[in-house]
Image (cartoon, grey):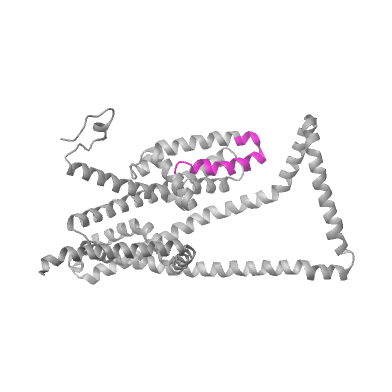
Amino acid sequence: MKHNDRHPYLSAGIVAFGVIAASMLLFFLLFHVREVTGFLERLGGILRPIFMGTVIAFLLLPIHRKILKFLISITPDKRMEDRGSHAFLNLVSAVFSLMIAFFLFYLLMAMVLPQVYDSVVGLVQSIPDYIESVQIWLQTFLEDNPDIQTAIMPVYNSAAASLEQWLNADILPNLESVATTFQWVRTTIWPNLTGMMVEVSGMVVGFLVLVKDLLIALIVSVYLLVRKDIFSAQSKKIVYSLFRTDIADFIVEEVRNAYRIMSGFINGKLLDSLIIGILCLICCNIFKFPYPALIAVIVGVTNIIPFFGPFIGAIPCGLLIFLVNPIQAIYFAVFILALQQFDGNILGPKILGDSTGLASFWVLFSILLFGGLFGFAGMVLGVPVFAMIYSVVSRLVVHGLRVRNLPVATQEYMGKTKPLSK
């Protein structure tokens, strides 16, 4: 049998082996889901500093490129002919970009944290007054509505009686003498305190692990910024070695397009949310809303979420203002609506432009889908991720239509169309 005669059988054997291996892998995954999930969670915990460093490097990449471009422009051409000079400038750019990010973060925290702390302390100190105001309001409301009072008072009396019985049966007898108090503390209070101490120690250990991961992530981010061109070239080598040249060109182009969508959306949304938070802080001070810094932080952070963000942040802020002054809560709702319109129609398009290329329906769809699957992170990253998927599918559809010599414009397929087969 000649070599060419064996080629079809070899291909069929490889395909059959791949199908059998994929079936066995699927069987293993279906019947060992818990073990696989545990392994992936453990692997994610081990590689968490790498993921964090990748995110930091991704956010710092625009700053790094601008600094590197500036340093290259002021460096003599003769010195740039040496590869060592370019590598040194690349490292300096990475360090400077990280220092700028630290400075901006420190400046933001120095301006925001003291005011947020004062707002939170004032809120906690005002809780008794809020409770008293609610009680007075309930008493007045029930006096004006005797039918509701008749229905609610038995529940209130039952809860009060249960509380009084708990105090008389469990608390006060244990405080009659030092011996009974000591016994009560040793048998009841101390085990709870021990569990609390275990939880506190666990939180401290978790915090130290987070600090360690952050330090490693910073080192990883500098390394990624310095070696990004080499990693990019190595990735292209792998792609071109595995796929046909036209398919590899398509993959490389889509990766570039994905980076453009992701970086444009995330960096633009962070800048947009920062501006909205500053505007909210200024306007809250002008309109004399309570807790202006706390409200501005909540509105600015939740504004990162597209579409639903301003309303998600407005609900708790509106409740805080309502406890202080119900009339101001109405003014705040009007202000948030105006701020959202300004952001959605003027500021957002100016900063983000058409970075995603998605229609409003697909924005809403991606937020609901990825938010339901991955929570807050899914709501933030769902739009750019879905935009990348939408771009790939669109390009594949256009390519398939052109191969078949069919029109690619959507208008050609609207309404009742004629058969397109020749």
The outermost residue toward the left is: 2
Q: Please identify the quadrant where the C terminus is shown.
A: top left
Which residue is at a point 57% across and 45% down the rendered structure image? 292
The answer to whether 11 appears left or right of 158 in the picture is left
Name the foreground residue: 289 vs 182.
182
Which residue is at a point 54% across and 47% down the rendered structure image? 298
The percent coordinates of residue 331 (x first, y second) are 58, 34
The image quadrant of residue 99 is bottom left
Q: Which residues are magenta?
A: 306-329
Q: Please identify the quadrant where the N terminus is shown.
A: bottom left
Q: Is residue 224 above or below residue 125?
A: below
The stretch drawn in magenta includes residue 355? no
How many circles with numbers are drawn on the protein?
0
The percent coordinates of residue 363 (x first, y second) are 40, 42
Which residue is at a point 75% across and 36% down the rendered structure image? 137
The stretch drawn in magenta includes residue 320? yes
The image quadrant of residue 390 is top left
Name the foreground residue: 319 vs 382.
382
Which residue is at a point 20% across and 63% down the rendered structure image? 11
The percent coordinates of residue 206 (x first, y second) are 55, 67
